[in-house]
């Protein structure tokens, strides 16, 4: 039965994406089929094999050690603030981002990350049939972050036509940055985080190739990555540490605001209609949860969490997932994969602002197709959840 539902889910995703395509005659189906098959194979390996369990365990183990090292610095500064045995969210989940950001800065400085990003991007461009720039950007987004990635290609930002700019922004919204992966792993199972990271990478290309198909000529396909201004090691380290702290503060502030506002709206709806706003949205998203593979009895609860992610952010939704009782392991896994992306309304402003900071005209272009960007990124999340549901 789950295979029939997965097939239905794929048909729904592709039909909804095809309906919104701006160039249906330009869709190239062979790369799409190859990437969907790759997604299915990779999901099987990660979720259903010993090799996958080893890889996920190794990845999670690395982050577990990194978080323990981060805790040393956090305890030195904030030790004694938390009551014994308690783990405040800001201290335990958000502040480790500072340490992970510092490590990313070091790997950037010694040229390890640029090498990895460039050559994985080149390999991906052979599979997805898109340009080297798009492939580089997708990998770089998953490591550097949805705002920072545009700095590395700022020389080309003003030269990009609208359709290529859309693909770059879609990649940034469909993936998540490596600096906050550790935070996710403390809220949901690491295997779902790793699976979503891999599936979203290909899913971004699949959905963009349907929504926004185009071909790139050899003359257009130039990848010129902006070198960061030469800094001393400690200048660089200080910059990345501060950047990580800013991310932690921004996420914390957004959580305070969104959780409080959702509580307010829920209170109003509860008083007037006898149902919370999130529960109402759950009914709207329940059909999508069902085609992702969630049992119908749990579809409204799952749909409520999915809606929360879209109207607020993935952290708020992950907190809700952890508090929701009665969900089966299958539903928890499918929803977890769906949540690992930046596909929400606030990301439209973040991405448009990042591009506008580098090129004002292009930033305005991004703002105009912002809702289309969110639509595509949400389809990527649904597609990843459908594929993962085959093996849960």
Image (spheres, grey):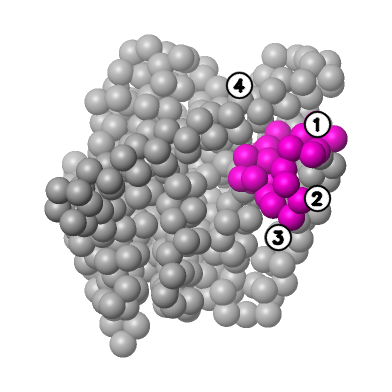
Q: Nearer the viewer, residue 64 or 263?
A: 263
Name the front one of labels 2 and 4.
Answer: 2
- In this picture, which residue range is highlighted in magenta? 76-100
User: Mark 3–mark 1 contact, CB under 8 Å?
Assistant: no
Q: Which residue is mark 2?
A: 68
Q: For marks 2 and 1, give the CA distance.
A: 15 Å
Q: Which residue is mark 1?
A: 77
Q: Which residue is mark 3?
A: 60
Q: Is residue 151 visible?
A: yes
Q: To which quarter of the image does residue 385 belong? A: bottom left
Whether residue 164 is visible: no
**How many residues crowd mark 4 within 10 Å: few (<14), some (14–19), many (20+)?**
few
Mark 2 vs mark 4, CA separation in Å: 34 Å
Between 94 and 20, the residue placed more toward the observer is: 94
N-terminal-most mark, 2 or 4: 2
Tell me, yes or no, whether the highlighted magenta stretch contains residue 118: no
How many numbered circles does the render carry? 4
Q: Are marks 4 and 3 in contact (CB under 8 Å)?
A: no
Residue 363 image-quadrant placement = top left
Residue at 50 percent across and 61 percent down: it is 322
Residue 108 in the image: state x and y as whole percent: 73, 32
Q: Which residue is mark 4?
A: 226
At x 25%, y 26%, the residue is: 368
């Amino acid at each position: 039965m789950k295979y029939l539902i997965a097939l239905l889910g794929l048909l729904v995703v592709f039909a909804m994406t095809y309906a919104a395509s701006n160039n249906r005659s330009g869709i190239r189906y062979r790369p799409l089929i190859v990437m969907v098959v790759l997604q299915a194979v990779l999901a099987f390996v990660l979720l259903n094999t010993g090799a996958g369990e080893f890889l996920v365990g190794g990845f999670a183990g690395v982050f577990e050690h990194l978080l323990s090292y981060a805790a040393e610095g956090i305890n030195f500064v904030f030790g004694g603030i938390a009551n014994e045995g308690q783990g405040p969210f800001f201290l335990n989940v958000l502040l480790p981002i500072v340490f992970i950001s510092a490590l990313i800065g070091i790997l950037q400085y010694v040229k390890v990350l640029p090498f990895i990003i460039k050559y994985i991007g080149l390999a991906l461009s052979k599979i997805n049939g898109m340009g080297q720039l798009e492939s580089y950007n997708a990998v770089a987004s998953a490591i550097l972050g949805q705002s920072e990635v545009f700095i590395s290609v700022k020389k080309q930002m003003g030269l990009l036509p609208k359709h290529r700019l859309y693909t770059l922004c879609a990649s940034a919204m469909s993936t998540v940055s490596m600096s906050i992966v550790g935070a996710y792993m403390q809220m949901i199972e690491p295997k779902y985080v790793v699976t979503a990271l891999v599936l979203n990478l290909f899913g971004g290309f699949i959905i963009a190739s349907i929504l926004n198909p185009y071909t790139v000529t050899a003359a257009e396909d130039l990848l010129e990555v902006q070198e960061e201004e030469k800094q001393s090691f400690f200048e660089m380290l200080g910059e990345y540490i501060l950047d990580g702290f800013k991310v932690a503060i921004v996420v914390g502030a957004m959580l305070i605001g969104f959780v409080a506002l959702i509580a307010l709206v829920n209170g109003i709806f509860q008083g007037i209609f006898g149902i919370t706003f999130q529960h109402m949205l759950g009914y709207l998203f329940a059909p999508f949860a069902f085609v992702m593979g969630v049992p119908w009895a749990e579809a409204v609860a799952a749909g409520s969490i999915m809606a929360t992610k879209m109207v607020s952010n993935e952290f708020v939704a992950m907190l809700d997932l952890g508090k929701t009782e009665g969900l089966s392991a299958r539903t928890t896994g499918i929803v977890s994969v769906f949540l690992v992306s930046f596909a929400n309304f606030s990301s439209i402003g973040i991405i448009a602002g990042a591009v506008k900071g580098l090129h004002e005209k292009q930033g305005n272009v991004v703002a105009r197709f912002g809702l289309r960007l969110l639509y595509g990124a949400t389809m990527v999340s649904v597609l990843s959840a459908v594929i993962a549901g085959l093996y849960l």
